[in-house]
Amino acid sequence: MPVVRDLRVLLRLTNFRRLLTVRLLSQCADGVYQVALAAYVVFSPEKQTSPGAIASAMAVLLLPYSAVGPFAGVLLDRWQRRQVFLYGNLLRAVLACGTAVLILASVPDWLFYVSALSVTAVNRFVLSGLSAALPRVVDADRLVMANSLSPTAGTLAATAGGGLAFAVRLVASDSDAAVVLLGAALYLCAALSSLRMSRELLGPDPDQVQPRLGAALASTAQGLADGLRHLSERHAAAHALAAMTLMRFCYGALTVMVLMLVRYAWPDGPGGGEDEGLALLGIAVAVSAAGFFAAAVLTPWMVGRLGPYGWMVMCAGSAAVLEPALALPFEPVPMMIAAFVLGLTTQGAKITTDTVVQSSVDDAYRGRVFSIYDVLFNVAFVGAAATAALMLPADGRSATLVIAVALIYAAAAAAMLRWNRRGDTP
């Protein structure tokens, strides 16, 4: 099979394997840390979680990225990306240890959120840097395949990290602090693994690196404006980002709905057990990850036959049709099937968007554009959570939300189809 052949070629590339190792360890740690946050914020028996509370938590943890993102992009286009992976993961290891201490001390929620925000804020630099560095370790002909394998493998690693977190909670008497410490250890491993690559390998080129932090921060506004201007001149990348942002909004709204269903509706009726709710959430995450894996296999083949926009049309269109059909019963089995479908379509569209942006945007601007990409992702997710909070009842069953999401998917598919027919393609 061509996919297997290309995959074997990619894995023979030493620097690609090393960059992939950093991603796998880093995102596995993210999965561990995120399960600890979910267990502490959503599933703690003493907390009466509501859609509004979930939306507030997402806003606290994600909206500040709108400020961090532009700085991340400008700095990523000046700092050596290998050093970002090294020091970023070391910093997250230290901060995660601080979060564990706060959990044990039973501090007020706002202080816990500040600590969690500090850990996840650094994630913007690491994930944006991984995407910006990928074209430095593979050739252009295999960039689609690399984008299929690398982010999807990272998502699977995050899922595996979530599984490890569940296991630690069982062994350590439901200790969220122990889970966070496991994440800290994995962040440390990710930092050390980055040392296997040379400082100059991942770019940017030496003549583009600004060694003085003050000068880099002072140029942030101009750098962001340049990145936006460059993106506006790359219509293919801008259109793909617009469609992906709409699909991210849909995914965020459905995430809040599933959280409420597994918390209150499915585990033995209203107020069901914490352990059963976490188990159902774990199944939903695993099934969605299986969809991500299917997307990694299918996307290079489908893009080769339909083109980038054509494949994104199919992804959004399929979600528009299947999401209401599977979600409206609000039952676990069809909802798990929906999780697979949406995992496949969302990841398929994301792989395609990453490739379009990487191939359409000049290397000197990739860090800034991917940071803009992250900002759009976070704002869309938080906006979706806020919208869901207004529409969802306590048990998470809302036909209105399901239908609204289907209409947004349909709008994204229609827009991409129009651009595809107009010939405004990568």
Image (cartoon, rainbow, N blue to C red):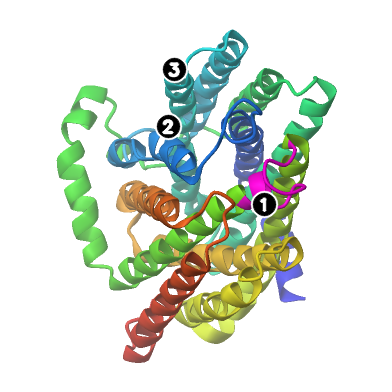
Q: Amino acid at mark 1?
A: Ala
Quarter-of-image position of residue 162: top right
Checking the image for residue 111, the label placed there is: 3
- Magenta part of the protein: which range? 261-273
* Separation of residues labelled 1 and 3 (CA atoms): 30 Å
What is the x, y in percent for residue 172?
80, 20
Marks 1 and 2, how far apart at CA: 32 Å
> Is residue 357 highlighted in magenta?
no
Whole-Å distance between the Cαs marked 2 and 3?
15 Å
Estimate the x, y position of residue 72 in percent, counting from the top left. Answer: 34, 37
- The secondary structure that most of the magenta stretch takes on is loop
Q: Residue 30: horizontal and vertical position, in percent? A: 60, 36
* Secondary element at image label 3: helix
- The residue that label 1 is drawn on is 265
The residue beneath circle 2 is 121
Q: Name the front one of labels 1 and 3.
A: 1
Helix, strand or loop at mark 1: helix
Label 3 environment density (alpha carbons within 10 Å; few <14, some 14–19, many ≥20): some
